[in-house]
Image (cartoon, grey):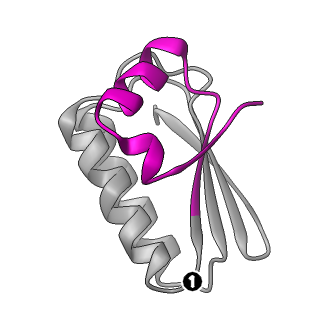
Amino acid sequence: MSSFEVEKKKETVLIRFTDKLASAAVEELRGTLKKMLSENISSITMDFKSIDLIDSMGIGLLVSTHNTLSSRDSELIITNLSPDLLELFTVMRLNEFFTIKGE
């Protein structure tokens, strides 16, 4: 079973996570993102509502995806971070790097 769901509407993609973003999920997500990034995508929104854990591989994938999208004038948006993950992103200064939104 996949640890995320993908919903594509024209040039935008919404990814809803159903489990932690750790090594096993990262590999599966990397393949999905690679396929999406070969298409004309204007933005990818990742909904972290069900996520309470992200490891270094997950953060690396977010950074890589952000960089690829930015080079194409597209955007990675992260939504619904838990307070703990928002604190982690703030300590790592990732809140200055990513577009982070609430609900």
Between residues 14 and 5, which one lies in front from this camera angle?
14
Vertical comparison of 92 with 14: above or below: above
Image: 98 above or below 95? below
Residue 34, picture quadrant: bottom left
Q: Secondary structure at mark 1?
A: loop
**Percent coordinates x, y for residue 70 in the rendering:** 48, 76
Compared across the picture, whether 7 is left or right of 41 comes to: right
Amino acid, disc 1:
Asp
Query: Is 99 one of the magenta-colored residues?
Result: yes
Relative horizontal placement of residue 10, taking residue 28 as reference (left or right) = right
Q: Where residue 89 sits: x, y (%)?
A: 39, 32
Residue 93: percent from the left, percent from the top?
Answer: 34, 40
Q: Which residue is drawn at the image coordinates 46% and 31% (left, top)?
A: 1
Is residue 4 one of those drawn in magenta?
Answer: no
Q: What's drawn in magenta, residue-wise?
A: 76-103
Quadrant location, the C terminus: top right
* Towards the viewer: 82 or 13: 82
User: Could you tell me how many numbered marks the image carries?
Assistant: 1
Q: Determine the residue positioned at 19% across, 36% down.
A: 56
The image quadrant of residue 80 is: top right
The residue that disc 1 covers is 73
Look at 72% across and 67% down and name the residue there. 12
The x, y position of residue 17, in whole percent, is 54, 33
Can you tell which quarter of the image residue 55 is in? top left
